[in-house]
Image (spheres, rainbow, N blue to C red):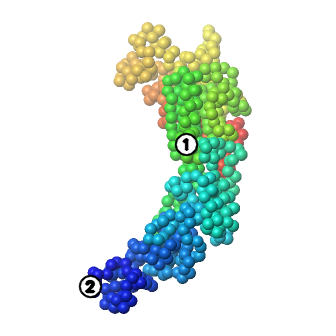
């Protein structure tokens, strides 16, 4: 018989024993294992086993069920062993692989046919098998990793449905004793699948996290994804403590393995990071004519951004409320909403965040009136904040003023306001009115008496344009954006008008410099954020203080929403991880 007559896989029981023996002696057939041969003489034996794995398993152990660790791994033979359920007791040693049988029932409801007479254990059966072992023989890290993967890949879509399947499988598999622990395992993960799970981040359901797990969670937030050895080095914890803490965070769906880190020597290590389903936070800028919502994951990834423009305030609130409900439904797969910050264009009292100061409000609505229009989950961590306070928070955490301890955000538009960060603290004042520069008396001289909010009207660009036109100059522009365009094009009259406007804003900035001596003033708003205005303000300020830098906000119109979501993220992380998480911004007068 020629060499080419033998296929790449030969089972000895299908041929005469003498023929197999002679072919082996002639070198036209090679032995792979007991009862198993190959005509591919030049091929690697281990590669041949992997190529014909299920045919070999099906012939050697007909009707077997892949189980235990082999059923949990993407590659069932990782580590050189394949675990199966079968009536045979003797293992089969193959090149690069050992097939290890254990007793148990054959395929039952839920198991998946792989072909060749081989079945794969269902998720329900795997859980029952794992929890039938003594606790010290359960690899909970591996179990948590596998279970999270089943959920992400859509293999497990309904935990309640899985609980029902497990009760049936427990009887068929003879695993009734492990049923209570499996159900408890699932109960710790189950969510209300009707949509009410948006309330998970309530005071009653906020996860109770151990000190070790808090330390590790905070490290993953601040340092980024890491392996267990890296986390042990960062945190100073022992390797067993790190393993226990990571397992706890995985159980709470806060952390998951992201990928395998390959190394030159030794086993590849899992790299852990914040889970996609860990939860999210919300920041909202509720202005007078527009609203901007920004949703972020706990580790700072932007999940959604929605804007509403050019609507009267009462109509705007209705549109914003509808958008918020839609956003919560859309982001449900990312886990619970833990915290939200709503930024308003009015002062917010620090001792009672639901009542504003007496004076101008948004369409006559107080903060509590505005809040009542929104449907938010009860008991989430909610903060109302002044819009410019949010903007300065954005700048000192992630913006132009990052790392500075004394910063002012000066917003100039139809209205004016200042957010103050002094001595490393966000200053709000006893009435929440710190930075309400519109209240500064103006005009003020021996012949003039201050008029309420006159400074805001004087610096607000609509009044400035009116003054330009009334003064009989050549400027007849009614739109500031068009005036700025003309100035940028070099039109002399427009350049002079913009420079003069910037000089007037600069006088206000000088007053703030004289009072607070900041390292930086960040200009924002539809007027303050323009480079020509900034240049004029900078020139005016430098005449008094060369030590105060004047810059434009890098966040442009998004500064307030950016600060709001930053404050919400900071609040959520402090509540989850406690003192292990170092807050990135401190608010004077706010109870921690």
Q: Position of residue 272 (x, y in %)?
A: 55, 58
Q: Which mark is residue 2?
A: 2
Query: Viewer-proximal residue, 328 or 35?
Result: 35
Work out whether 15 lies above or below 384: below
Which quadrant would the N terminus be assigned to in this image? bottom left
Q: Residue at x 34, y 89 (%)?
A: 19
Helix, strand or loop for disc 2? loop
- Answer with the quarter of the image where residue 280 lies: top right
Q: Position of residue 243 (x, y in %)?
A: 62, 64
Q: Position of residue 568 (x, y in %)?
A: 61, 40
- Please report contact status of discs 1 and 2: CB closer than 8 Å, yes or no: no
Which quadrant would the C terminus be assigned to in this image? top right
Work out whether 331 lies above or below 374: below
Residue 408 can be seen in this image: no
Work out whether 91 lies above or below 533: below
Q: Which mark is residue 379?
A: none
Work out whether 325 lies above or below 436: below
Tally of marks: 2
Q: Is residue 210 left or right of residue 10?
A: right
The residue to which callout 1 is attached is 331
Q: Residue at x 58, y 65 (%)?
A: 126
- Answer with the quarter of the image where residue 179 lies: bottom right
Q: Residue at x 48, y 65 (%)?
A: 113
Query: Viewer-proximal residue, 301 or 40?
Result: 40
Q: Residue at x 46, y 66 (%)?
A: 114
Query: Viewer-proximal residue, 49 or 543?
Result: 49
Q: Is residue 397 left or right of residue 531?
A: right
């Amino acid at each position: 018989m020629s060499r080419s007559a033998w296929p790449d896989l030969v089972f000895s029981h299908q041929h005469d024993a003498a023929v197999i023996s002679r072919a082996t002696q002639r070198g036209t057939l090679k032995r792979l294992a007991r009862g198993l041969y190959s005509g591919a003489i030049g091929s690697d034996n281990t590669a041949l086993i992997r190529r014909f794995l299920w045919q070999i398993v099906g012939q050697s152990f007909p009707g077997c069920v892949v189980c235990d660790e082999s059923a949990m791994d993407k590659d069932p033979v990782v580590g050189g062993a394949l675990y199966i359920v079968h009536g045979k007791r003797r293992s089969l040693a193959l090149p690069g692989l050992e097939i290890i049988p254990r007793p148990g029932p054959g395929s039952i409801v839920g198991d998946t046919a792989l072909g060749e007479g081989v079945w794969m254990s269902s998720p329900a059966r795997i859980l029952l098998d794992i929890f039938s072992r003594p606790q010290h023989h359960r690899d909970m890290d591996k179990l948590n990793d596998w279970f999270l993967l089943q959920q992400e890949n859509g293999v497990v879509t309904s935990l309640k449905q899985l609980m029902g399947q497990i009760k049936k499988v427990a009887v068929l598999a003879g695993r009734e004793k492990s049923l209570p622990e499996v159900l408890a395992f699932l109960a710790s993960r189950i969510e209300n699948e009707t949509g009410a799970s948006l309330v998970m981040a309530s005071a009653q359901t906020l996860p109770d996290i151990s000190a070790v797990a808090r330390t590790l969670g905070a490290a993953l937030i601040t340092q980024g994804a890491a392996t267990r050895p890296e986390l042990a080095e960062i945190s100073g914890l022992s390797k067993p403590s790190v393993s226990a803490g990571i397992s706890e965070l995985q159980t709470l769906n806060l952390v998951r393995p992201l990928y395998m880190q390959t190394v030159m020597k030794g086993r590849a290590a899992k790299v852990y990071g914040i889970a996609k389903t860990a939860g999210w936070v919300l920041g909202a800028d509720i202005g007078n004519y527009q609203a901007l919502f920004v949703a972020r994951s706990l580790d700072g990834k932007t999940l959604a951004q929605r804007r509403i423009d050019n609507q009267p305030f009462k109509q705007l609130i209705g549109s914003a409320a509808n958008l918020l409900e839609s956003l919560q439904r859309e982001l449900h797969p990312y886990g619970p909403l833990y915290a939200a910050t709503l930024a308003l264009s009015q002062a917010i009292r620090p001792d009672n965040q639901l009542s504003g100061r007496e004076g101008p409000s948004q369409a006559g609505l107080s903060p509590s009136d505005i809040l009542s229009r929104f449907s938010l989950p009860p008991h989430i961590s909610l903060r109302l904040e002044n819009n410019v306070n949010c903007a300065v928070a954005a700048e000192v955490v992630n913006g132009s003023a990052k790392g500075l301890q004394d910063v002012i955000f000066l917003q100039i538009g139809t209205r004016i306001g200042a957010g103050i960060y002094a001595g490393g603290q966000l200053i709000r004042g006893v009435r929440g009115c710190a930075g309400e520069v519109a209240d500064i008396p103006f005009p003020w001289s021996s012949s003039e008496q201050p008029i309420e909010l006159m400074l805001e009207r004087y610096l607000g660009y609509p009044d400035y344009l009116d003054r330009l036109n009334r003064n009989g100059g050549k400027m007849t522009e009614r739109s500031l954006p068009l005036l700025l365009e003309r100035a940028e094009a070099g039109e002399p009259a427009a350049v002079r008008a913009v420079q003069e406007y910037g000089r007037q804003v600069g006088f206000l900035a000088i007053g703030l410099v004289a009072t607070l001596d900041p390292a930086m003033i960040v200009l924002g708003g539809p007027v303050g954020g323009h480079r020509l205005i900034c240049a004029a303000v900078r020139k005016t300020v430098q005449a008094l203080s060369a030590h105060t830098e004047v810059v434009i906000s890098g966040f442009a119109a998004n500064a307030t929403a950016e600060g709001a979501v930053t404050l919400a993220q900071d609040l959520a992380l402090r509540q989850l991880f406690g003192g292990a998480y170092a807050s990135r911004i401190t608010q004077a007068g706010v109870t921690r």
